[in-house]
Image (tube, rainbow, N blue to C red):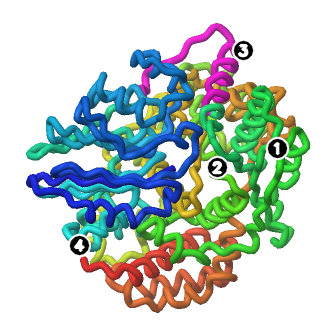
């Protein structure tokens, strides 16, 4: 995790060092170990370095290759290093080449197609002095961030929005469309920000900016039709295990101690146990640090949902670990909201971010810079319930009935719910089950209808039309388990979540790494037959089988996982009441939210904190927005 900035004067005016230095100064917290700027004519690049990998210790950025006329800055960890060194014909050992050198060599060989050859988490910019153009690219999953401003005269970019707002030429106006999207929890617009004139570069996208042209291209996408065909269940398990272990191994490349998040769930425990085995096999017998959330102060009725201490301990007793514990029951969702917003540059609709914030702080305080995170194995592997609809379509009734019975036995999900949610609903047109829900009193997701948002605001910005424009592609009935899995993997919320995590972890000079968001692992999991994802009544069946002998049995065959929500519901009202009181009276929110509706939601939440789930979420979002609007004071 480092920080990058850049400018390209499309009007040909020179870029002064004070402009690049000013932008870089705004994000120096991302890379305190080294920094530099490069300026030539109408272009400038900047970089602040956080040493993470062994190769980064000798990396100097920005870097100019005078022979090719190319200059590069990047925030990158490239994982297919050996493959690239061979394919590019570089005469060097794997550990001798920096990631930026690999990217630059890839650009020299493949040009704007180079990002498709890179495996890892990256964002980079290359200025081509001969052709007077800037080329930028962001990794396939969107782990690394890039924001930019583009006009006829200027193209500027930065790892964080605050780098752009240092430029007087960049307008700073509130984007009310993003305010509306935020209030109804709509994330489908992958370029929008709270600033009208500042955009985000979407994941898996490259951008070419020259004096008179701009071209954005998607360089990678998942193939929803590819299917992996192997001879046996054992071969599938071994293929998955090999890919998963490699995804963890790549993310252990570090010049500093690594911390692994350990919740006691299937995902984080798998990463932690595999990391420990990789340490041992490499002869590294130092303890592997872990960080876990614990909630000893919550009432017993909450602990039955949230307490995973016995599963955390089950992992810790299997190896050489050095555990660290965050007493999450002493935290409140909004206690650091202003500090978090400073680093995110925007209001955030993420109820559990305060927990990750504290885990990043703990990682930093213990001298570590790498944080292994189990987000989001559920989606990458898939629970696999869509397989049941496939069985119906193929008329395999005996297999269907057996799986339904075993799901009830192993996972504790009732037969009626399985048949309704995973057999009938996926095969019905959307309007059928929407009508059914309406007839039975289920009015849908109020975050999308925006019941607290004023009618005038919704109508002025065309909420209905905006939502419908994003839902058009999902109105047709999904026919196969693989198509449904593809749809889940392309859900736009994940890129937003990864962006928030990037900036929140950067506040503590920590780089978050996600083994389950490895491009190779995602491609493999999507290509697996549906029966490998749900089998013998077990969801995520292939992961459970692949972790045989690696995970403790109690975790390997856990039917469910903990639920962090009770801590949020209790602590928001107990610890953040003053801010909630100010929110329901906030005139800053009056143009967007119905204050009387907010007060009614607050009363409902006060009377039943553990049961007013939608009300508490909406109050959290409203309070977050009010604080941010009062702080930045942008004009619409």
Task: Residue 425 in the image: state x and y as whole percent.
Answer: 53, 41
In the foreground, 392 or 610:
610
Query: Circle 1 is placed at which residue position?
Result: 287
Q: Please tell me in which quadrant of the rendered image residue 216 appears.
A: top left
Asked which secondary structure carries label 3, the reply is helix
Classed neighbour count for the residue bearing mark 3: other residues with Cα under 10 Å, few (<14), some (14–19), many (≥20): few
Instruction: Give the mark nearest the N terminus, 3 or 2.
Output: 3
Instruction: Give the mark nearest the N terminus, 1 or 2.
Output: 1
Query: Circle 4 is placed at which residue position?
Result: 460
Task: Residue 254 in the image: state x and y as whole percent.
Answer: 63, 41
Left or right: residue 139 compared with residue 620: left
Where is 513 relative to 534, above or below?
below
Query: Circle 2 is placed at which residue position?
Result: 371
Decide if residue 491 is in sight here: no
Left or right: residue 76 compared with residue 335: left
Identify the residue at image location x=45%, y=88%: 596
Query: Circle 3 is placed at which residue position?
Result: 234
In the foreground, 594 or 585:
585
Instruction: Give the mark nearest the N terminus, 3 or 1.
Output: 3
């Amino acid at each position: 995790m480092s920080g990058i900035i850049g400018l390209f004067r499309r009007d040909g005016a020179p870029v002064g060092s004070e402009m690049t230095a000013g932008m870089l100064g705004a994000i120096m917290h991302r890379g305190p170990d080294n920094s530099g700027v490069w300026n030539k004519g109408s272009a400038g690049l900047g970089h602040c370095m956080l040493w993470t990998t062994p190769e980064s210790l000798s990396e100097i950025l920005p870097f100019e290759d005078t022979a090719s006329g190319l200059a590069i800055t990047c925030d990158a960890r490239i994982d297919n290093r050996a493959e690239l060194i061979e394919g590019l014909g570089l005469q060097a050992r794997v550990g001798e080449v920096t990631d930026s050198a690999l990217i630059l060599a890839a650009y020299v060989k493949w040009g704007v197609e180079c990002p498709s050859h890179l495996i890892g988490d990256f964002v980079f910019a290359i200025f081509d002095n001969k052709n007077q153009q800037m080329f930028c690219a962001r990794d396939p999953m969107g782990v690394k961030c890039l924001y930019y401003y583009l006009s006829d005269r200027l193209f500027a970019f930065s790892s964080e929005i605050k780098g752009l707002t240092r430029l007087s030429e960049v307008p700073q106006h509130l984007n009310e469309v993003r305010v509306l999207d935020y209030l109804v929890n709509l994330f489908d617009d992958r370029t929008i920000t709270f600033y009208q004139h500042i955009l985000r570069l979407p994941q898996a996208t490259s951008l070419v900016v020259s004096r008179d042209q701009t071209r954005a291209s998607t360089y990678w996408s998942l193939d929803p039709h590819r299917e992996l065909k192997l001879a046996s269940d054992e071969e599938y398990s071994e293929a998955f295990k090999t890919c998963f272990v490699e995804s963890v191994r790549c993310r252990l490349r570090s010049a500093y101690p690594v911390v692994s998040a350990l919740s006691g769930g299937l995902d984080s425990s798998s990463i932690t146990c595999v990391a420990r085995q990789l340490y041992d096999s490499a002869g590294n017998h130092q303890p592997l640090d872990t960080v876990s959330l614990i909630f000893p102060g919550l009432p017993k009725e909450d602990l039955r949902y949230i307490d995973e201490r016995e599963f955390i301990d089950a992992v810790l007793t299997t190896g050489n670990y050095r555990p660290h514990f965050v007493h999450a029951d002493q935290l409140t969702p909004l206690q650091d909201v202003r500090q978090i917003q400073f680093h995110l540059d925007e209001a955030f609709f993420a109820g559990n971010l305060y927990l990750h914030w504290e885990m990043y702080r703990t990682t930093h305080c213990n001298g570590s810079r790498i944080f292994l995170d189990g987000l989001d194995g559920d989606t990458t592997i898939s629970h696999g319930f869509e397989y049941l609809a496939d069985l119906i379509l193929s008329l395999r009734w005996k297999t269907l009935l057996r799986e339904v019975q075993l799901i009830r036995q192993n996972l504790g999900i009732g037969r009626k719910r399985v048949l309704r949610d995973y057999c009938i609903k996926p095969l019905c047109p959307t309007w059928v089950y929407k009508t059914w829900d309406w007839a039975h009193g289920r009015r849908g997701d109020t975050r999308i209808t925006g019941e607290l948002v004023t009618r005038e605001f919704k109508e002025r910005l065309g909420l209905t039309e905006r939502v419908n424009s994003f839902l058009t592609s999902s109105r047709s009935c999904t026919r196969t388990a693989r198509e449904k899995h593809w749809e889940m993997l392309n859900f736009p919320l994940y890129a937003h979540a990864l962006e928030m995590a990037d900036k929140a972890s950067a506040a503590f000079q920590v780089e978050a790494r996600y083994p389950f968001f490895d491009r190779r692992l995602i491609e493999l999991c999507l290509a697996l037959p549906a029966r490998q994802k749900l089998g013998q009544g077990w969801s995520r069946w292939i992961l459970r089988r692949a972790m045989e002998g690696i995970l403790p049995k109690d975790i390997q065959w856990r039917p469910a996982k903990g639920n962090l929500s009770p801590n949020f519901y209790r602590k928001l009202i107990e610890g953040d009441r003053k801010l909630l009181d100010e929110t329901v009276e906030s005139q800053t929110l009056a143009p967007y939210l119905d204050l009387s509706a907010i007060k009614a939601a607050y009363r409902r939440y006060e009377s039943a904190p553990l049961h007013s789930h939608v009300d508490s979420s909406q109050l959290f979002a409203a309070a977050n927005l009010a604080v941010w609007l009062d702080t930045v004071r942008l004009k619409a």
